[in-house]
Image (cartoon, rainbow, N blue to C red):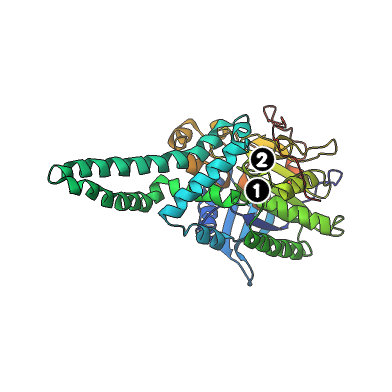
């Protein structure tokens, strides 16, 4: 692919794989509509959105005119939000059980200690739900103790009466989780790690459906097929693309194939003992010549393993490794001082900044990548990787599936 000459993209298919997100994919359509308009006004190009024609996966159509070229793009969301919703239906007791099980897994295997050698931000994000859920429990117990103590002055037998308040307090915290995110994050980490790094069977079935959708697109009449994986959607995309390239190593006569991983958290999975398939897929994808893989993170995103090469840090890189090219979205440079001031404490919003407009854009522009006249490979082929990227192979578990 590196030897291919540049060509103008007139028609593109984009497939977006979200992270652990329980919401309907229309939120991504509306985000794209809003943010693409903002970016177009800053960068001086035309972009518009319309309804998707035909059935199949959920998506929308984008028409753009950038640098004098008209481009038509179909964007599809590969949905697994129903699996996320099912995994989030756990009650309070089950969530605290998940807390104990997940924390023990990362601590007992040494994965947590090794992950801290990469970036502190995502480790803090991982510890936050554990700490905050425990704090909620302690608060409930203290209030119950206080009430019980007061009741004991009336009659000693009433001292245990304070216990009845524990559950309502915990339930109150749970109902406020749309602002606190403790249950959400705990269930995210618990779902991903429930099989010690292996995928649940229902997720594997969904990934097979994603693969079939992408294989059909690769026989479509378009100039580029671009897969975008955000957050935990990045390692799901690795699984899907590696399997496609195992089944179709040459991809003869297919459109250009690009993979854009954004805000990835791959080490949270690849550092677990039974992530054999993920480690295999990371190595195989990194050596492929029929794909172009760009990994974009930013140190300002505390939820991602910023500038950590997911293949190298997982300990599976070889001398044949080609990908990914690891670059920074450099929020402190690509956002104005005022905009950065507004966003820098909004940690979860920053984790989605890769999908949004920048008021001081650099070469990373999500909308030019997904709807512009250059393929991902042409746009970034000569882009040097970040000098501050982390490639140290600190992962202990390096076994790979055959």
Q: What is the tally of numbered marks visible in this picture?
A: 2
Left or right relative to 110: residue 399: right
Q: Which of the numbered marks, if any, corresponds to residue 150?
A: none
- Residue sitting at 86 percent across and 60 percent down? 253
- Along the line of sight, which residue is nearer the eye, 96 or 49? 96
- Residue sitting at 59 percent across and 61 percent down? 79
Q: Which of the numbered marks, if any, corresponds to residue 197?
A: 1
Q: Is residue 160 visible?
A: yes
Q: Which of the numbered marks, if any, corresponds to residue 271?
A: 2
- Residue sitting at 85 percent across and 47 percent down? 4
What x and y, as percent, mark residue 262? 62, 44
What x and y, as percent, mark residue 380? 73, 40
Q: Cα distance, mark 2 to mark 1?
A: 8 Å
- Residue sitting at 23 percent across and 40 percent down? 146
Left or right relative to 120: residue 169: left
- Along the line of sight, which residue is nearer the eye, 67 or 154? 154
User: Are dots 2 and 1 in contact, CB under 8 Å?
Assistant: yes
The mark nearer the N terminus, 2 or 1, is 1
Left or right relative to 103: residue 150: left
What x and y, as percent, mark residue 173? 35, 49
Q: Is residue 66 visible?
A: no
What x and y, as percent, mark residue 101? 53, 46
Secondary structure state at the residue bearing disc 1: loop
Local packing at callout 1 (Cα closer than 10 Å; few below 14, some 14-19, many 20+) is many
């Amino acid at each position: 692919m590196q030897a291919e000459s540049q060509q103008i993209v007139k028609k593109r298919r984009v497939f977006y794989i979200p992270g652990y997100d329980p919401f309907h994919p229309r939120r991504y359509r509306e985000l794209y509509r809003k943010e693409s308009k903002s970016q177009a006004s800053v960068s001086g190009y035309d972009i518009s959105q319309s309804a998707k024609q035909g059935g199949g996966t959920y998506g929308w159509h984008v028409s753009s005119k950038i640098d004098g070229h008209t481009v038509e793009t179909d964007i599809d969301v590969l949905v697994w939000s129903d699996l996320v919703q099912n995994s989030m239906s756990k009650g309070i007791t089950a969530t605290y059980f998940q807390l104990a099980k997940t924390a023990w897994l990362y601590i007992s295997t040494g994965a947590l200690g090794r992950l801290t050698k990469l970036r502190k931000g995502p480790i803090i994000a991982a510890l936050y739900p554990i700490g905050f859920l425990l704090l909620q429990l302690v608060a409930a117990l203290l209030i119950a103790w206080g009430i019980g103590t007061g009741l004991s002055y009336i009659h000693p037998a009433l001292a245990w009466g304070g216990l009845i308040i524990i559950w309502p307090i915990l339930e109150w915290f749970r109902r406020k989780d749309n602002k606190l995110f403790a249950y959400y994050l705990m269930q995210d980490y618990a779902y991903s790690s429930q099989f010690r790094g292996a995928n649940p069977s229902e997720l594997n079935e969904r990934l097979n459906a994603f693969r079939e959708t992408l294989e059909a697109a690769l026989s479509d009449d378009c100039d580029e097929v671009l897969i975008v994986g955000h957050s935990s959607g990045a390692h799901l995309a690795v699984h899907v693309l590696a399997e496609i390239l195992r089944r179709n190593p040459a991809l003869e006569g297919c459109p250009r194939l690009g993979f854009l991983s954004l805000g990835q958290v791959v080490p949270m999975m690849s550092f677990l003992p039974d992530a054999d398939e993920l480690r295999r897929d990371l190595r195989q994808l990194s050596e492929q010549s029929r794909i172009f893989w760009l990994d974009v993170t930013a140190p300002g995103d505390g939820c991602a393993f910023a500038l950590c090469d997911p293949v190298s840090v997982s300990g599976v890189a070889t001398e044949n490794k080609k990908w990914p090219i690891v670059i920074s979205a450099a929020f402190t440079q690509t956002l104005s001082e005022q905009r950065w001031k507004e966003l820098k404490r909004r940690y979860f919003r920053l984790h989605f900044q890769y999908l949004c407009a920048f008021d001081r854009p650099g070469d990373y522009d999500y909308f030019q990548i997904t709807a512009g006249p250059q393929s991902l490979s042409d746009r970034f082929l000569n882009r040097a990787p970040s000098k501050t990227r982390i490639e140290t192979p600190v992962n202990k578990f390096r076994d790979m599936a055959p």
